[in-house]
Image: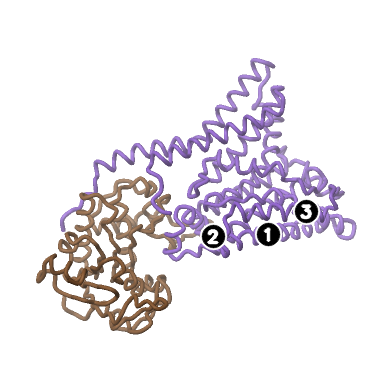
Chain colours: A brown, B purple
């Protein structure tokens, strides 16, 4: 897969008051590629993904998505086009079932006696299908999400992105709140996403995870890109050096 | 592609255990309901050698008793599921009752009776929507906590209703309205029939519509709803307006039943409405609750009130009994929440 990048960030800068949160940062993401975004706290990782996902707008620079320049006014616009973000807290409604979460805010309707009603069967079936594609097993689709495990909930969040045909998936610390066995499963999930051609931006503090899953690593420090390398061509010492600036 | 099993064995165990807990917690209203009915039936048979519930007069009286608390509780159910509370419903009901009486008195005689009724009812509903709209805007746009915002509206609606009524009750004399308030169709009181229809509509709205689904989502996680693109502010305004409207209908039916509107019409019903919702299985933390549960909750309150009178117990015991049922309900809800690991957001 060496066609054009699905996402290209070019010379983006963002200031908050007098603070340069991002300065002249560029990166590219190819389909089926996992790009790890590394950096210490305050390095600008969050600001960068918020710009890509439409939460913030860049002060300078451009973003190209699928070959065309884009300017997302809000996260909703970005999602409609296929840039999904999975936050650390997953943004799931724990009181609702899997189907309701996959379709949250975009519930399909059918007609009953001429009245529009929720098509729960369709929500459940299509949610099950999305998770099956990812090879995720969840036994009960009628239970609220709070009764699922952390890894399963993560899988629902990813399944939602897949169902809505995300081409770019941004994952903010997807393994941070999980136990070790579940972390491994999320890593496996990311690998299967990669095979289905989704471009993944993966933010993590955990270098072990970064090396386990990414193809390329971009390191940010104080709002600037200080390094970019193929994961195979580097080691954790070098990444740490870039991160802390030694 | 390798299969990724996600803790199948572990999750099977937790889902089984949690589904039992969810079931017990969701069934608590029914458990109370049957315990009460059977309790009063046994009491009536042993003490007075008569039946309690199988007597149609008793059943119909309980249903009439339940109308007021239930109408307030229907809107309250939406509010509580969204994670809020509406303390202003009681006086919104009184305000609607006074407006209805005033308009009815002004139009009865001048126009055809049914027209006077429709006109008065329409104005009363519009008037009752105003406090709901203000509540919704305060809570959704200015982010005032629902408890405080609706407590303020409690005072405003109360004062306005008394001012409008001139501090007294407003008697009405429109034969059609008296018939609606006290007549029966097929030996079912009309107020009960009206309430059944509205309950059905609310059930549909909550369980089948996108709006209802979003109310649950907002109560479950406001953050997730916002990120999913749900218009949280607009939905919040809508559900407080809905709550005010069901209170307004309560005010109209109250006036019809007692052939007088009064500012204090809904005063004792506010706590009953919240009690009905909570007893019915809704969580005050938001995110759960059903209309069926609320109906059962309202019936439980009506059965306690009517049943204690029926078996000749001092009526003041009803407050004690309802209070105990509320506390037990909330305890069940909390235990269930803690056991299932609480919530991960906010």
Q: Position of residue B325 (x, y in %)?
A: 57, 33
Distance (Cα) linking label 1 and label 3: 14 Å
Is B344 on the left-hand or right-hand side of B104? left
* Left or right relative to B32: residue A139: left
Q: What residue is drawn where x is 52% and y is 38%?
A: B330
Residue A139 relative to residue B217: left or right: left
Which residue lies under the disc numbered 3? B161
Mark 1 and mark 3 on one chain? yes
Residue B225 vertical position relative to residue B284 in the rendered view, above or below: below
Rendered location of residue B273, percent (x, y): 63, 43
Could you give the CA–CA distance between mark 3 and mark 2, rounded to whole angstroms?
A: 40 Å
Dot 2 lies on which element? loop
The answer to whether residue A197 is seen in the rendering is yes
Vertical relation: B346 (above or below) B234 = above
The 10 Å Cα crowd at callout 3, few under 14, some 14 to 19, many 20 or more, is many
Q: Quadrant for residue A238, please give it.
A: bottom left
Q: Position of residue B255 (x, y in %)?
A: 78, 47
Q: Closer to the N terminus: mark 1 or mark 3?
A: 1
Q: Secondary structure at mark 1?
A: helix
Q: Residues within 10 Å of mark 1 (few under 14, many from 20)?
A: many
Label 2 and label 1 in one chain: no
Label 2 to label 1: alpha-carbon separation: 27 Å
Q: In the picture, which quadrant includes the C terminus of chain A?
A: bottom left
- Tag 1 residue: B129
Of badges 3 and 2, nearer the viewer stands 3
* Residue A229 placement (x, y as % from top left): 15, 74
Pointer 1 chain: B
């Amino acid at each position: 897969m060496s066609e054009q990048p699905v996402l290209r960030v070019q010379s983006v800068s963002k200031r908050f008051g007098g603070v340069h949160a991002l300065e002249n940062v560029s990166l590219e993401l190819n389909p089926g590629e996992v790009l790890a975004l590394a950096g210490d706290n305050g390095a600008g990782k969050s600001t960068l993904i918020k710009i890509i996902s439409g939460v913030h707008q860049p002060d300078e620079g451009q973003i190209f998505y699928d070959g065309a320049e884009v300017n997302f006014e809000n996260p909703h616009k970005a999602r409609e086009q296929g840039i999904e973000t999975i936050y650390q807290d997953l943004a799931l409604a724990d009181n609702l079932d899997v189907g309701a979460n996959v379709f949250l805010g975009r519930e399909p309707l059918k007609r009953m006696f001429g009245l529009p009603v929720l098509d729960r069967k369709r929500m459940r079936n299509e949610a099950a299908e999305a998770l099956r594609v990812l090879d995720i097993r969840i036994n009960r689709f009628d239970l609220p999400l709070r009764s699922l495990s952390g890894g399963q909930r993560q899988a629902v969040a990813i399944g939602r992105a897949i169902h809505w045909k995300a081409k770019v998936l941004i994952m903010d610390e997807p393994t941070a709140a999980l136990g070790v066995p579940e972390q491994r499963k999320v890593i496996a999930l990311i690998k299967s996403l990669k095979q289905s051609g989704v471009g993944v931006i993966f933010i993590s503090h955990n270098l072990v995870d970064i090396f386990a899953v990414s193809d390329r690593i971009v390191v940010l420090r104080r709002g600037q890109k200080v390094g970019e390398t193929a994961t195979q061509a580097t080691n954790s010492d070098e990444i740490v050096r870039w991160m802390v600036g030694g | 592609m390798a299969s990724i099993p996600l803790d199948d064995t572990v999750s099977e165990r937790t889902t089984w255990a949690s589904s039992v807990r969810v079931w017990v917690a969701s069934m608590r209203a029914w458990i109370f309901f049957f315990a009460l009915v059977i309790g009063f039936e046994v009491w009536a048979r042993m003490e007075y050698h008569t039946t309690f519930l199988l007597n149609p007069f008793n059943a119909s009286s309980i249903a009439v008793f339940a109308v007021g608390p239930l109408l307030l509780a229907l809107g309250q159910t939406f509010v509580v599921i969204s994670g809020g509370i509406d303390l202003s419903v009681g006086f919104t009901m009184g305000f609607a009752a006074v407006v209805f009486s005033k308009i009815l008195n002004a139009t009865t005689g001048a126009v055809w009776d049914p027209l006077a009724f429709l006109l008065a009812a329409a104005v009363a509903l519009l008037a009752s929507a105003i406090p709901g709209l203000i509540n919704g805007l305060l809570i959704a746009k200015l982010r005032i906590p629902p408890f405080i915002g609706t407590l303020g509206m409690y005072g405003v609606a109360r004062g306005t209703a008394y001012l409008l009524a001139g501090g007294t009750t407003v008697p009405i004399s429109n034969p059609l309205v008296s018939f609606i308030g006290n007549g029966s169709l097929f030996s079912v009181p009309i107020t009960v029939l009206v309430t059944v229809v509205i309950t059905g509509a609310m059930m549909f709205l909550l369980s089948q519509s996108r709006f209802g689904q979003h109310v649950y989502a907002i109560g479950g996680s406001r953050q997730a709803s916002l990120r999913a693109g749900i218009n949280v502010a607009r939905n919040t305004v809508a559900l407080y307006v809905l709550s005010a409207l069901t209170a307004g209908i309560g005010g109209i039916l109250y006036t019809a039943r007692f052939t007088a509107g009064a500012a204090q019409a809904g005063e004792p019903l506010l706590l009953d409405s919240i009690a009905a919702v909570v007893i019915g299985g809704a969580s005050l933390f938001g995110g759960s609750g059903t209309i069926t549960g609320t109906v059962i909750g309202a019936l439980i309150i009506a059965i306690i009130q009517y049943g204690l009178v029926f078996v000749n117990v001092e009526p003041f015991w009803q407050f004690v009994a309802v209070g105990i049922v509320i506390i037990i309900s909330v305890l069940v809800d909390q235990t269930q929440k803690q056991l299932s690991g609480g919530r991960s957001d906010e």
